[in-house]
Image: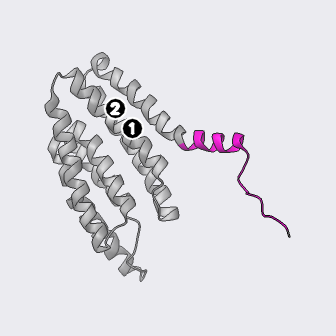
Amino acid sequence: MTTQTSRQPPLRTRRADRWRAGAPALAGLTLGLLTAVLLPLAGPSTYRWTVTAIVLAASLALSLVDEATLTLPNRYVAALAVFAASQVAAASLLQHSIELALSAVAASAIVAGIYAVFAIVGWVGFGDTKFAAVLALVVAVVAGMFAAYIPVLAILISWARILFRRFRRRPDQHPHGLSLAIASIVVMLLFI
Protein backbone atom coordinates (compact mmCIF):
# COMPACT_ATOMS: atom_id res chain seq x y z
CA MET A 1 0.00 0.00 0.00
CA THR A 2 1.47 3.30 -1.08
CA THR A 3 0.60 6.64 0.31
CA GLN A 4 0.22 9.65 -1.86
CA THR A 5 2.33 12.63 -1.02
CA SER A 6 1.25 16.20 -1.36
CA ARG A 7 2.44 17.76 -4.58
CA GLN A 8 2.80 21.29 -3.29
CA PRO A 9 5.76 23.24 -4.56
CA PRO A 10 8.53 24.04 -2.09
CA LEU A 11 8.00 26.96 0.27
CA ARG A 12 10.50 29.13 -1.60
CA THR A 13 8.53 28.74 -4.84
CA ARG A 14 5.23 29.60 -3.15
CA ARG A 15 6.73 32.79 -1.69
CA ALA A 16 8.09 33.78 -5.09
CA ASP A 17 4.64 33.23 -6.63
CA ARG A 18 3.07 35.48 -3.99
CA TRP A 19 5.63 38.17 -4.76
CA ARG A 20 4.95 37.94 -8.49
CA ALA A 21 1.21 38.23 -7.86
CA GLY A 22 1.68 41.39 -5.78
CA ALA A 23 4.31 43.03 -7.97
CA PRO A 24 1.83 44.76 -10.34
CA ALA A 25 -0.03 46.32 -7.39
CA LEU A 26 3.25 47.54 -5.94
CA ALA A 27 4.13 49.04 -9.34
CA GLY A 28 0.73 50.76 -9.44
CA LEU A 29 1.30 52.22 -5.97
CA THR A 30 4.79 53.44 -6.86
CA LEU A 31 3.60 55.04 -10.10
CA GLY A 32 0.64 56.53 -8.27
CA LEU A 33 2.79 58.14 -5.59
CA LEU A 34 5.24 59.49 -8.14
CA THR A 35 2.39 60.97 -10.16
CA ALA A 36 0.81 62.46 -7.03
CA VAL A 37 4.04 64.35 -6.36
CA LEU A 38 3.71 65.86 -9.83
CA LEU A 39 0.47 67.70 -8.98
CA PRO A 40 1.94 70.42 -6.74
CA LEU A 41 5.21 70.59 -8.69
CA ALA A 42 4.04 70.81 -12.29
CA GLY A 43 0.51 72.16 -11.96
CA PRO A 44 -2.95 70.80 -12.69
CA SER A 45 -2.71 70.76 -16.49
CA THR A 46 0.48 68.69 -16.63
CA TYR A 47 -0.90 66.43 -13.91
CA ARG A 48 -4.12 65.75 -15.87
CA TRP A 49 -2.18 64.96 -19.05
CA THR A 50 0.14 62.64 -17.13
CA VAL A 51 -2.74 60.76 -15.49
CA THR A 52 -4.48 60.49 -18.86
CA ALA A 53 -1.34 59.09 -20.49
CA ILE A 54 -0.88 56.52 -17.71
CA VAL A 55 -4.55 55.47 -17.89
CA LEU A 56 -4.26 55.23 -21.68
CA ALA A 57 -1.23 52.94 -21.46
CA ALA A 58 -2.61 50.78 -18.65
CA SER A 59 -6.11 50.42 -20.07
CA LEU A 60 -4.88 49.60 -23.57
CA ALA A 61 -2.48 47.01 -22.14
CA LEU A 62 -5.34 45.43 -20.21
CA SER A 63 -7.49 45.57 -23.33
CA LEU A 64 -4.87 43.66 -25.30
CA VAL A 65 -4.85 40.98 -22.60
CA ASP A 66 -8.66 40.90 -22.76
CA GLU A 67 -8.64 40.61 -26.56
CA ALA A 68 -6.15 37.73 -26.43
CA THR A 69 -7.51 35.76 -23.47
CA LEU A 70 -11.09 36.99 -22.90
CA THR A 71 -10.10 37.66 -19.28
CA LEU A 72 -9.02 40.64 -17.24
CA PRO A 73 -6.56 39.26 -14.66
CA ASN A 74 -7.10 40.50 -11.11
CA ARG A 75 -3.45 41.34 -10.54
CA TYR A 76 -3.36 43.78 -13.45
CA VAL A 77 -6.71 45.38 -12.66
CA ALA A 78 -5.52 45.65 -9.05
CA ALA A 79 -2.46 47.59 -10.20
CA LEU A 80 -4.71 50.11 -11.94
CA ALA A 81 -6.99 50.17 -8.88
CA VAL A 82 -4.07 50.99 -6.57
CA PHE A 83 -2.97 53.73 -8.97
CA ALA A 84 -6.54 55.10 -9.09
CA ALA A 85 -6.93 55.07 -5.31
CA SER A 86 -3.62 56.85 -4.83
CA GLN A 87 -4.64 59.55 -7.32
CA VAL A 88 -8.01 60.08 -5.65
CA ALA A 89 -6.41 60.30 -2.20
CA ALA A 90 -3.57 62.58 -3.31
CA ALA A 91 -5.77 64.94 -5.29
CA SER A 92 -8.25 65.20 -2.41
CA LEU A 93 -5.50 65.88 0.13
CA LEU A 94 -3.69 68.41 -2.02
CA GLN A 95 -6.90 70.28 -2.84
CA HIS A 96 -8.06 70.08 0.78
CA SER A 97 -11.41 68.78 -0.41
CA ILE A 98 -13.19 65.57 0.45
CA GLU A 99 -15.63 66.38 -2.36
CA LEU A 100 -13.28 65.05 -5.05
CA ALA A 101 -12.89 61.72 -3.25
CA LEU A 102 -16.63 61.40 -2.66
CA SER A 103 -17.50 62.19 -6.26
CA ALA A 104 -14.89 59.71 -7.53
CA VAL A 105 -16.25 56.96 -5.29
CA ALA A 106 -19.82 57.84 -6.28
CA ALA A 107 -19.00 57.74 -10.00
CA SER A 108 -17.21 54.42 -9.54
CA ALA A 109 -20.17 52.99 -7.60
CA ILE A 110 -22.63 54.09 -10.28
CA VAL A 111 -20.56 52.52 -13.04
CA ALA A 112 -20.01 49.35 -11.00
CA GLY A 113 -23.75 49.06 -10.37
CA ILE A 114 -24.59 49.46 -14.05
CA TYR A 115 -21.97 46.91 -15.06
CA ALA A 116 -23.06 44.49 -12.33
CA VAL A 117 -26.53 44.49 -13.90
CA PHE A 118 -24.96 44.01 -17.35
CA ALA A 119 -22.92 41.07 -16.00
CA ILE A 120 -25.93 39.44 -14.32
CA VAL A 121 -27.89 39.73 -17.57
CA GLY A 122 -24.92 38.22 -19.43
CA TRP A 123 -23.98 41.13 -21.64
CA VAL A 124 -20.48 41.49 -20.17
CA GLY A 125 -18.28 39.51 -17.82
CA PHE A 126 -17.66 40.30 -14.17
CA GLY A 127 -14.06 41.18 -15.09
CA ASP A 128 -15.49 44.02 -17.15
CA THR A 129 -17.42 45.14 -14.08
CA LYS A 130 -14.30 45.52 -11.95
CA PHE A 131 -12.37 47.09 -14.84
CA ALA A 132 -15.17 49.63 -15.40
CA ALA A 133 -15.32 50.53 -11.70
CA VAL A 134 -11.56 51.08 -11.53
CA LEU A 135 -11.54 53.14 -14.71
CA ALA A 136 -14.40 55.30 -13.41
CA LEU A 137 -12.47 55.90 -10.18
CA VAL A 138 -9.38 57.21 -11.96
CA VAL A 139 -11.32 59.07 -14.66
CA ALA A 140 -13.24 60.91 -11.93
CA VAL A 141 -9.96 62.52 -10.81
CA VAL A 142 -9.91 64.39 -14.12
CA ALA A 143 -13.58 64.49 -15.16
CA GLY A 144 -15.48 64.38 -11.86
CA MET A 145 -18.96 62.87 -11.95
CA PHE A 146 -18.85 62.82 -15.75
CA ALA A 147 -16.99 59.53 -15.34
CA ALA A 148 -20.45 58.02 -14.89
CA TYR A 149 -20.91 58.41 -18.67
CA ILE A 150 -18.35 55.70 -19.37
CA PRO A 151 -20.99 52.93 -19.70
CA VAL A 152 -22.98 54.91 -22.27
CA LEU A 153 -19.95 55.50 -24.48
CA ALA A 154 -18.64 51.95 -23.99
CA ILE A 155 -21.97 50.42 -25.04
CA LEU A 156 -22.09 52.66 -28.13
CA ILE A 157 -18.55 51.60 -29.04
CA SER A 158 -19.46 47.94 -28.51
CA TRP A 159 -22.50 48.29 -30.74
CA ALA A 160 -20.30 49.79 -33.45
CA ARG A 161 -17.90 46.86 -33.04
CA ILE A 162 -20.80 44.39 -33.30
CA LEU A 163 -22.07 46.05 -36.50
CA PHE A 164 -18.58 45.93 -37.96
CA ARG A 165 -18.26 42.24 -36.97
CA ARG A 166 -21.63 41.47 -38.59
CA PHE A 167 -20.55 43.26 -41.75
CA ARG A 168 -17.49 40.97 -41.82
CA ARG A 169 -19.73 37.95 -41.04
CA ARG A 170 -18.11 37.23 -37.69
CA PRO A 171 -19.83 36.27 -34.44
CA ASP A 172 -21.17 39.15 -32.33
CA GLN A 173 -19.35 38.15 -29.14
CA HIS A 174 -16.24 40.22 -28.46
CA PRO A 175 -14.22 41.36 -25.43
CA HIS A 176 -15.62 44.53 -23.90
CA GLY A 177 -12.36 45.80 -22.35
CA LEU A 178 -11.30 47.78 -25.41
CA SER A 179 -14.66 49.58 -25.53
CA LEU A 180 -14.23 50.52 -21.85
CA ALA A 181 -10.70 51.76 -22.44
CA ILE A 182 -11.69 53.92 -25.41
CA ALA A 183 -14.72 55.34 -23.57
CA SER A 184 -12.59 56.22 -20.54
CA ILE A 185 -9.96 57.98 -22.60
CA VAL A 186 -12.62 59.93 -24.52
CA VAL A 187 -14.18 61.14 -21.25
CA MET A 188 -10.78 62.12 -19.87
CA LEU A 189 -9.79 63.99 -23.03
CA LEU A 190 -13.04 65.97 -22.97
CA PHE A 191 -12.17 67.36 -19.54
CA ILE A 192 -8.46 68.09 -19.70
**Is the residue 37 above or below the residue 66 in the image?**
above
Residue 175 relative to residue 44: left or right: right
Amino acid type assigned to the residue bearing label 2 in the image:
Ser
Q: Are marks 2 and 1 in contact (CB under 8 Å)?
A: yes
The quarter of the displayed image where residue 63 is located: bottom left
Q: Residues within 10 Å of mark 2 (few under 14, many from 20)?
A: many
Name the outermost residue toward the front. 1
Q: Which mark is residue 140?
A: none
Quadrant housing the N terminus? bottom right
Q: Is residue 68 above or below residue 26?
A: below
**Residue type, label 1:** Val
Q: Nearer the viewer, residue 46 or 176?
A: 176
Q: Position of residue 76 (x, y in %)?
A: 47, 47
Judged from this view, the residue extending furthest toward the right is 1
- Residue found at the far top of this picture: 41
Callout 1: few (<14), some (14-19), or many (20+) C-alpha neighbours within 10 Å? many
Total labels: the figure holds 2
Q: Is residue 192 magenta?
A: no
- Using the image, tell me which numbered label, if any, was put on residue 86: 2
Residue 135 x/y as whole percent: 31, 47
Q: Residue drawn 34% across and 68% down?
A: 124
The circle drawn on residue 82 is: 1
SS class of the residue under badge 2? helix
**Residue 47, image x and y in percent?**
30, 28
Q: Between residues 54 and 33, which one lies in front from this camera angle? A: 33
Confirm whether the magenta stretch covers residue 6: yes
Q: Which residues are magenta?
A: 2-21
Which x, y percent locates residue 8?
70, 53
The image quarter containing residue 150 is bottom left
Q: Is residue 150 visible?
A: no
Q: Secondary structure at mark 1?
A: helix
